[in-house]
Amino acid sequence: MSPFCFPVPGLCFLLSLSGVVAQKTKGTCRLCPLYASCVNDTHCTCNHGYISESRQKYFTYPLEICEETTPSETNSSMKELQQVVENIESLLTNKTVWETEKTKNITATFTSILQKVESVVLETALKAPNQKLQKVQNRTVAVETRVVTDDCSTGVIFNLNAQTNSMDIHCSDIIQGNTQGPSAVAFISYSSLGNIINASFFEKVNEKDQVYLNSQVVSAAIGPKRNTSLSQAVTLSFQHVKIKPSIKKVFCVYWKGTKEGGHWSTEGCFLIQANKTHSICNSTHLSSFAVLMAFDTQEKDPTLTVITYVGLSLSLLCLLLAALTFLLCKAIQNTSSSLHLQLSLCLFLAHLLFLTAFDRTEIKVLCAIIAGALHYLYLASFTWMLLEGLHLFLTARNLRVVNYSSVNRFMKKLMFPVGYGVPAVIVAISAAFRPQLYGTRDHCWLNLNQKFIWAFLGPVCAIICVNFVFFILVLWILKRKLSSLNSEVSTIQNLKMLTLKATAQLFILGCTWCLGILQMGSAARVMAYLFTIINSLQGFFIFLVYCLLSQQVRKWFGEIIKSKSEPELHTLSSRFGPDSKPSEDK
């Protein structure tokens, strides 16, 4: 990898993955490390009473430390750590550095800086083993180190804090079996580093989710053995930079160095808990960590919400009335009405559960059960829609046959095993392989991860396509029949009613659900309104077409009203006979 220039006050650095190489730059020595001065505009030297850690009188290394010649161990260690932090701040706040690196491999620079900072902080902490706990903080970076000088007691866990973040690590993982000398752990938090290495370097980033880095970048390291693997996972707690209620996904990530530079990765990092203000992660290794979030960018439209609830409420009423009509009206009880009844019942239960429990996410197990029930009920509804389309096609194909017994026998054998059995098989297979994907953070529905939503969309899209084919075939058959008909009135009336029902299938049989797929681009809002209005009124269309527009049902309604009015007339006639006179008040 080619080196790249990294100008900071006082020097110009050529950084590479193998280390940091200094290059003299004339006239750029304006800021040297703490307790150091500039010499000849090219080099730095430690002030009187101090000596460089490298024991060189003149140096250009940006993280060099000037030590007191006769300091106390505690004060010296703290000052050294303070100096390291000051040097890191100077490095990170230099805008020229990062603007220059935008045209180069900034990820390699980032990886190199993180590794160097961790090494310097650990070396500084191990120089004063008696100073077990050290904390230094400024506006850019915060560091806390802990030194362990003896064997760990069983189960001892150390908690380190830097700014608003913390880490819990087992003592046994700090010493790594080292009993010959002190061991140290460092926890570093960077305030603004996430602005440079942001979520665009996430390996799983995609166009659908707008992912943001919503925490400070932290680093964790142990020494003198720089092992990164752990016997027990560390627990990291992050405070969110921005508090947003509409969190869609949370990713615990670490910075993974590669030959090309590096990127954010979720490997070995797991989310334990997350709320609006904090996220808690576990990691099986040490590195630099952060929290990435995908926020829900779809703002809820209150008008659509009102339309949904009003439309579904009206559909529930219409579906209930339709189901009662199909059950009680003997004049229309046949295979067709049985199909209408089962479709009405499935849609009624699905809409009722959707309105009452779709957002009941407090109890995960209950939410998963609700999601599974909704999955089954809506799949069953679409399956009955498919059977409706098949029955309409078979009826149209057999128009010339006076007796429809063959069609009825076929449908009676087929409809119940298919209508309720096929959805049960699909849901059972989905629940067996991906039970954890039933229920989301916001809704009791199928999770979009791992394309699990296709357990619903796949069958639905297939049914919509088949029903649309049935619709075209029925229209074609009707056109041929109409062109060859004689003037028999009853036959023409039957064909007209069949044509009306065939047209209604676009709404009743779910073909309008394809509007949901068309919610893209500039027409997305219009399609969203059409989809919501038409599909929330599906129950109303069923009651209108199969009940209110049916002559047999209207006649049945008239008989019911007439039968209720006749007893009242009989009572009045018996009370006031032909010879009786109403009494007069005296």
Image (tube, helix red, strand yellow):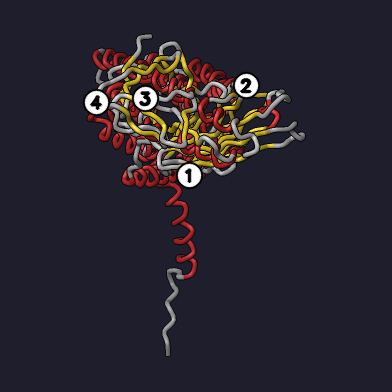
**In this rendering, the label closer to the viewer, 4 or 2:** 4
Horizontally, residue 318 falls left or right of residue 121, namely left
Kindly identify which residue carries mark 3: 200
Q: Look at the numbered discs 4 and 2 and tell me whether their residues touch, using CB distance below 8 Å.
A: no
Amino acid type at mark 4: Gly
Residue sitting farthest toward the top: 1
- Ranked by sequence position, the earlier of labels 2 and 1 is 2
> Which residue appears at 61% of the width and 25% of the height?
223
Kindly identify which residue carries mark 4: 27
Alpha-carbon span between mark 1 and mark 4? 47 Å
Amino acid type at mark 1: Thr
Kindly identify which residue carries mark 2: 225
- Ranked by sequence position, the earlier of labels 3 and 2 is 3
How many discs appear? 4
Q: Nearer the viewer, residue 270 or 498?
A: 270
- Kindly state the secondary structure of the residue where label 2 is placed: loop
- Kindly state the secondary structure of the residue where label 4 is placed: loop
Q: Quadrant of the N terminus?
A: top left
- Ranked by sequence position, the earlier of labels 4 and 2 is 4
Alpha-carbon span between mark 3 and mark 1? 22 Å
> Which residue appears at 34% of the width and 30% of the height?
507
Alpha-carbon span between mark 4 and mark 2? 40 Å
